[in-house]
Amino acid sequence: MSNTHTFLAKLIHWTFIPLYAYGIFKQVDDLSQLEDPSLLNFEILFATVFLVIVLLRYFYMKDTPTLLGAHDELPKGHLFIAKMVHRLVYFSLIMLPTTGLLIAGLFSLETGGVEIAISIHEFSADLSYVVIALHVGATFYSRFKGEGLWNAMVPIWKETEKNNSNLVSRLEVIEKKVYKEIEDKFIKE
Ligand code: HEM
Ligand code: HEM
C-alpha cells in the first residue's frame, strides 16, 4: 500500500477549487463598482473568508510530506521544485485576498495608492494562473510516468503501474540532470 493524503486533505484540496474559480470569475471589473456599498461589503467578506480558509489549509498541510504517494524515494531536487511550486501557490492565494482588502481599504479611505494595490492584485492573479497551471501540468506528467503521486490526492482515473517505456526512461535521464543541478546550487548538505 502506498501513502495517501488524509480524507480531510483531499476534501480541502477539491472543495477549494470551486471557491478559487468563483473568486476569479466574480472579479471586480473596474474600480467604480466599489462605489456600491453592498458590493464592497460582499467583496470584503468574501476576501476575508477566502484568506482564512487558505491560512487554515496551509497550517493543516504544512507538516505533510510533499509528494508522499511516490512509490520510490524521490531525488531532493525533485522535492525542492515541488515544495517551491506549492509555496508559490500559497503565496499567490494569500496575496490575492490581502491585496483585495488593501484595495478596499485605500478606496474607502481615499488616501491614494489604490492603482499600485490594483497592479499587485492583478500580478497575484496572474501568478496564481501560472503556478496552478504548472502544478496541474506536473501532476499529469507524474500520472503519465506512474509515480504514485496522483493516487495519493486524485480519487478518479487511478494509476495502475509504473510506465517503463523508452520515452519515460529518456525523460528521466534529463530530469536527473536537472535535479542534480538544483541540488548542487540550492541544497546544502
Ligand atoms: C485551483 C486549483 C488547485 C490548487 C490551488 C491546488 C493546490 C495544491 C496544493 C497547495 C497542494 C499541496 C498540498 C496542500 O497543501 O494541499 C496540492 C497537492 C496536490 N494536487 Fe493540487 N491544486 C489544484 C488543482 C489540482 C488538480 C486539477 C490536480 C490534478 C488533476 C491536482 C493534483 C494534486 C496532487 C496529486 C497533489 C498531491 C501532491 C503531493 O502529494 O505533494 N491539483 N495541490
Ligand atoms: C479572494 C478574493 C479576490 C479574488 C480571487 C480576486 C480576483 C481578481 C481578479 C482575477 C482580478 C483581475 C486581475 C487581472 O485583470 O489580471 C481582480 C481585479 C480587481 N479586483 Fe479582485 N479579487 C479578490 C478580492 C478583491 C477585493 C476584496 C477587492 C476590493 C474590494 C477587489 C478589487 C478588485 C479591483 C478594483 C480589480 C481591478 C479592476 C480593474 O481592472 O480596474 N478584489 N480581482
Image (tube, helix red, strand yellow):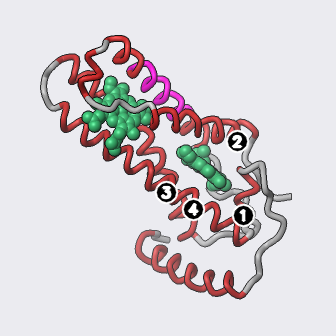
Sequence order check, earlier mark of 3 and 4? 3
Q: Is mark 1 within 8 Å of ligand 1?
A: yes
Q: Amino acid at mark 4?
A: Gly
Q: Which residues are magenta?
A: 44-56
State the residue in front, 32 or 67: 32
Front label number (2 vs 1): 2
Question: For the point 66% across and 66% down, which residue is it?
Answer: 142
- Which residue sits furthest right? 1
Residue 75, how many percent across, how many down? 60, 72
Callout 2: SS: helix
Nearer to us in this view, 54 or 22:
22
Q: Is residue 18 magenta?
A: no
Label 1 crowding class (10 Å Cα cut-off): few <14, some 14-19, many 20+? Answer: some
Instruction: Name the residue furthest top.
Output: 37
**Whole-percent x, y for residue 36 in the image:** 30, 14
Q: Nearer the viewer, mark 3 or mark 4?
A: 4
- Residue 85, numbered label: 3
Q: Identify the residue under disc 1.
A: 70
Horizontal side of 146 relative to 160 (left or right) equals left
Query: Which circle, 2 or 4, is nearer the viewer?
Result: 4
Q: Which mark is residue 35?
A: none
Which residue is labeled 2 in the image?
10
**Residue 42, quarter of picture:** top left
The foreground one among 186 and 86 is 86
Image position, residue 9 (x, y; %): 68, 40
- Gap between marks 2 and 3, in whole Å? 18 Å
**Residue located beneath label 4 in the image:** 137
Q: How far is the residue under mark 1 from the one under mark 3?
A: 17 Å
